[in-house]
């Protein structure tokens, strides 16, 4: 028998070389080569050009808008996502299955479709916009609109990460704590919250990362005013339309780096969630 | 499911939480859905049908079907191969490989389009080769397909890897020991066990492929009747203030999304544990 290659354990199942080879080839051609191409292009730019592009006032303003509002939207999703997950897991409700299925809508609905629906809903003549107009509140075509779109696209993440953890929680620990005289608030903050924290943070980070890159749902409701409500992906598109490939590449490289750092953080959080011992 | 009284939430708080949860879902999910159908039919069924029968709308629908028909099978084959390699064998670098497969999810759709503009664009290393052979990638169907493949790259693999990991390798090992070949083992042993997870992965991949906007928008060139997919056509109609037609065409994608969710619920109901939640 052939000696096993050192990097894998032997198995009787065939197809290792074929499937891994195909996987790696496809991964390289579709994902890794094009992505490294972008970084290569960015690195070939003269350093001062790169710096001047990514620190120009309009780009900096877009970073502020993208990071700030994505963070805010993820925070809103963290709070309400926890409440939704809690209600779905712990309380009896009519039509629970339907509500649960609807949570996934932002995953399945195309972003452009979500964008036109949200901007119609919140525009001053829309169903919700009309109600808010007399109060002098406008939530469309300004930064608030961006927040609404990003809350929509990030909505399922926290619910879906927290739900299973909450479901698997051992109620006996809570009962024991109650028996020992802990209040409901103490049980929540000392037992439940620490237990679901990794999942909660994972969901938050996923929603935040998703919001950073989001384009389709945002541009219809944002108003897209430079310096005020312009997101980074839109700045990249604008540069491309002006054939400023170098500028688009530089801005994209910084955003990609931020996204990959977020991915790293999410992976670490997930590992933390897996390794966490049951709370006792 | 009777709860211990010490743990039961007091009624006012419980009602408040339920109200907050339902209100949140109502405002952010149910109302937008109602707007989508309300606006689509706002000018009557006649206008709805004629928006869908419009020449450019039909061309967009055809193009979207074509792009999905190429991109989705590609990613399905990849997803099957990747999850077979990852779950049936033990090798170094597995975690890294899974992370790399997930990579496209953390790339902004706009950047997903941009990388192919840089790769195939006028001043790239590859453009000379394709020009000589008169092959158009950008602003044509191949560009749309490859951007769609990138954006929907992880869906099938992500759905299958946890499922196949859970099922282990004993069944396949037994089949091989009994003399089955590789393909036979896959068709007769593995596939029946993963078919529902595979179906959902493919459906989700398809819904995203047909609905992709940002990446496709960058590589399309927006040539009416030629490189406009359904989402791009919706954007065009909306920006021309042709709202009823925009929502009518968008309703195709809305129905597709709802159908995907319905099938997921059905699979989840009858085959619990075979569909991943996120």
Image: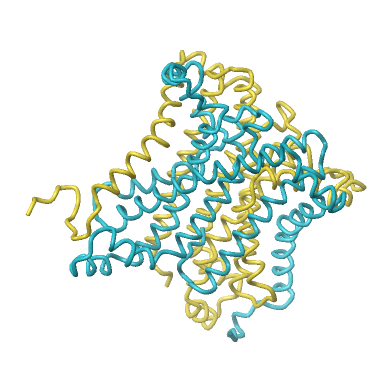
Q: Is residue B1 above or below residue B263?
A: below
Image location (x, y in percent) of residue A120: 80, 45
Image location (x, y in percent) of residue A109: 64, 51
Quick one: B188 or B268, which is closer to the camera? B188
Image location (x, y in percent) of residue B92: 24, 48
State left or right for residue B126 relative to residue B148.
Answer: left
Colouring style: by chain
* Quadrant where the image shows the C terminus of chain A: bottom left
Given the current orientation, which residue lies at the most extreme right position? Answer: A134
Q: Residue at x 78, y 55 (%)?
A: B37
Chain A: what color?
Answer: yellow
Chain B: what color?
Answer: cyan
Image location (x, y in percent) of residue B36: 76, 52
Q: Is residue B125 above or below residue A212?
A: above
State left or right for residue A127 relative to residue B28.
Answer: right
Q: Is residue B81 above or below residue A170?
A: above
Residue A20: in sight, yes or no? Answer: yes
Q: Residue at x 33, y 49 (%)?
A: B95
Quick one: A97 or B233, which is closer to the camera? B233
Quick one: B220 or A103, which is closer to the camera? B220
* Quadrant where the image shows the N terminus of chain A: bottom left
State left or right for residue B137 relative to residue B190.
Answer: right
Residue A64: in sight, yes or no? Answer: no
Q: Is residue B185 above or below residue A205?
A: below
Q: Residue at x 47, y 76 (%)?
A: A170
Given the current orientation, which residue lies at the most extreme left position? Answer: A1
């Amino acid at each position: 028998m052939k000696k096993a290659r050192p990097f894998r354990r032997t198995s009787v199942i065939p197809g290792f070389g074929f499937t891994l080879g195909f996987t790696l080839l496809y991964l390289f051609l579709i994902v890794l080569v094009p992505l490294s191409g972008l970084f290569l292009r960015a690195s070939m730019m003269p350093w001062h050009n790169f710096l001047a592009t990514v620190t120009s006032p309009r780009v900096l303003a877009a970073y502020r808008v993208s990071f700030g509002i994505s963070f805010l939207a993820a925070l809103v999703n963290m709070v309400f996502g926890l409440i939704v997950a809690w209600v779905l897991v712990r309380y009896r409700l009519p039509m629970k299955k339907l509500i649960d299925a609807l949570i996934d809508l932002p995953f399945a609905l195309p972003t452009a479709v979500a964008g036109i629906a949200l901007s119609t809903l919140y525009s001053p003549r829309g169903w919700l916009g009309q109600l808010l107009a007399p109060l002098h509140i406008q939530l469309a075509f300004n930064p608030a609109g961006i927040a609404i779109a990003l809350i929509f696209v990030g909505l399922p993440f926290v619910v879906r990460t927290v739900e299973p953890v909450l479901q698997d929680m051992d109620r006996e620990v809570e009962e024991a704590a109650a028996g020992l005289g802990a209040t409901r608030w103490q049980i929540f903050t000392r037992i439940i919250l620490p237990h679901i924290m990794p999942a909660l943070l994972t969901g938050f980070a996923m929603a935040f990362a998703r919001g950073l890159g989001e384009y389709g749902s945002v541009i219809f409701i944002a108003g897209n005013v430079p310096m005020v409500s312009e997101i980074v992906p839109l700045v990249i598109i604008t540069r491309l339309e002006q054939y400023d490939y170098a500028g688009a590449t530089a801005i994209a490289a910084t955003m990609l780096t931020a996204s990959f750092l977020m991915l790293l953080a999410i992976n670490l959080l997930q590992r933390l969630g897996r390794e966490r011992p049951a709370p006792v | 499911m009777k709860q211990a009284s010490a743990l039961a939430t007091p009624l006012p708080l419980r009602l408040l939480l339920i109200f907050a949860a339902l209100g949140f879902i109502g405002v952010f999910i149910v109302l937008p859905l109602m707007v989508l159908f309300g606006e689509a039919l706002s000018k009557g069924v006649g206008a709805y049908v004629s928006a869908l029968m419009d020449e450019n709308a039909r061309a967009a629908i055809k193009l979207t079907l074509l792009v999905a028909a190429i991109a989705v099978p590609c990613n399905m084959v990849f997803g099957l191969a990747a999850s077979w390699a990852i779950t049936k064998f033990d090798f170094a670098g597995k975690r890294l490989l899974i992370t790399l497969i997930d990579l496209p999810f953390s790339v902004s759709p706009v950047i997903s389009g941009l990388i192919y503009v840089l790769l195939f664009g006028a001043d790239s290393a590859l453009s000379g080769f394709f020009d000589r052979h008169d092959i158009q990638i950008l602003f044509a169907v191949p560009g749309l397909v490859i951007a769609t493949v990138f954006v929907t790259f992880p869906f099938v693999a992500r759905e299958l890897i946890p499922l196949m990991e859970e099922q282990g390798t004993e069944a396949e090992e037994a089949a091989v020991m009994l003399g089955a070949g590789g393909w036979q083992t896959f068709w007769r042993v593995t596939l029946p066990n993963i078919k529902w997870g595979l179906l959902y992965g493919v459906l989700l991949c398809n819904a995203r492929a047909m609905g992709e906007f940002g990446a496709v928008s960058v590589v399309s060139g927006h040539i009416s009747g030629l490189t406009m997919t359904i989402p791009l056509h919706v954007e065009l109609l909306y920006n021309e203030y042709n709202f009823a037609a925009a929502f009518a065409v968008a309703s195709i994608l809305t129905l597709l999304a709802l159908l995907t969710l319905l099938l997921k619920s059905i699979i989840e109901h009858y085959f619990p544990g075979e569909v991943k939640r996120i």
